[in-house]
Amino acid sequence: MQVGQIGAKLSAVTVNPTWQLALAMVMLVVLAVVASLLGRLGIAKSSVIASIRAVVQLGIVSVILVYALAHLWAACLFTLLMFAIAVRTTANRSGVGKAWIWAAVAMLAGVIPVLLIIFATGCAPFSPASLIPVAGIIIGNIMSGHTLACRRFFADLREGIGIFEAGLAVGFPRRDAIALVTEPSVTESVLPTVDRTATVGLVTLPGAFVGVLLGGGSALQAGAAQALVLIGILAGQTVTVVVAHELVKRAKLLPEDLAGKLHP
């Protein structure tokens, strides 16, 4: 099944903007707030704000997509916008706001080859209806992988600054001294994606698979679409984590506090 057909299949499953939808969303937000208060999670206010933002943003995006899905150049611009927002998000979350360009480099290293393979092989048509959802899934998951990897690297470096300095003391160059601290976390950063890919269909049935089934597609079509997406995510995240780690070792992708401490 071509990934571009996923949208057509999902169109059979519709949720209309009715008062029932509004009621359901309000009830779900209330449920999240009550659970947060009872569990003392401290996310009641942020849950409400996040929900309101989601509704507003999706409303705006829906209007934009009406045009973007009809014009390839608009779809490409929208994809670039998604990527730019993803870079900004991961840079802020990992604390590398001033080094955002290197976050973009790491993410591009994962996103570009995956999308090229998907569209160049012809398993998905290079059309607006295919580009936007596929690129969105790949970019979103690579963003998450980059954020988690960098946060882990930086936490390790803050806790293991003594190991780094010991490496310098015995003559290691800065790159190798940083690697002494961060190397163990590289594999850990991609293990969740490896496990999710390995157990798909046995432990979980991801969204694309379920969506195609609910939209009237066959089990084989659903499996083909989901396999393509999952393996694409795995490949993209792996490349991005490897490149991000290399940039960390070269002291280019670092938050300000570590940039000052990890002297040559």
Image (cartoon, grey):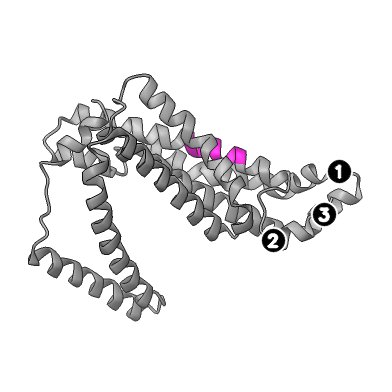
Label whose residue precedes the other's in the sequence (2 or 1): 1
The answer to whether one can see residue 134 in this image is no
Numbered disc 1: secondary structure: loop
How far apart are the two marked residues, 2 and 1, measured between alpha carbons? 23 Å
Q: Is residue 86 magenta?
A: no
The location of residue 201, given as percent across then percent down, is: 29, 37
How far apart are the two marked residues, 3 and 1, measured between alpha carbons? 12 Å
Kindly identify the amino acid type of the residue bearing the numbered disc 3. Answer: His
The image shows residue 147, relative to residue 107, as above or below, that is: below
Residue occupying the far right of the picture: 170
Q: Nearer the viewer, mark 2 or mark 1?
A: 2
Which corner quadrant of the image does residue 35 belong to? bottom left
Q: From the viewer's side, name the closer residue of 147 and 127.
A: 127
Q: From the viewer's side, name the closer residue of 260 and 203.
A: 260
Kindly identify the amino acid type of the residue bearing the numbered disc 1. Answer: Phe
The image shows residue 147, relative to residue 200, as above or below, that is: below
> Most prominent secondary structure in the magenta stretch?
helix
Marks 2,1: beta carbons within 8 A:
no
Residue pointed to by mark 3: 263
Residue pointed to by mark 2: 256
Label whose residue precedes the other's in the sequence (3 or 1): 1
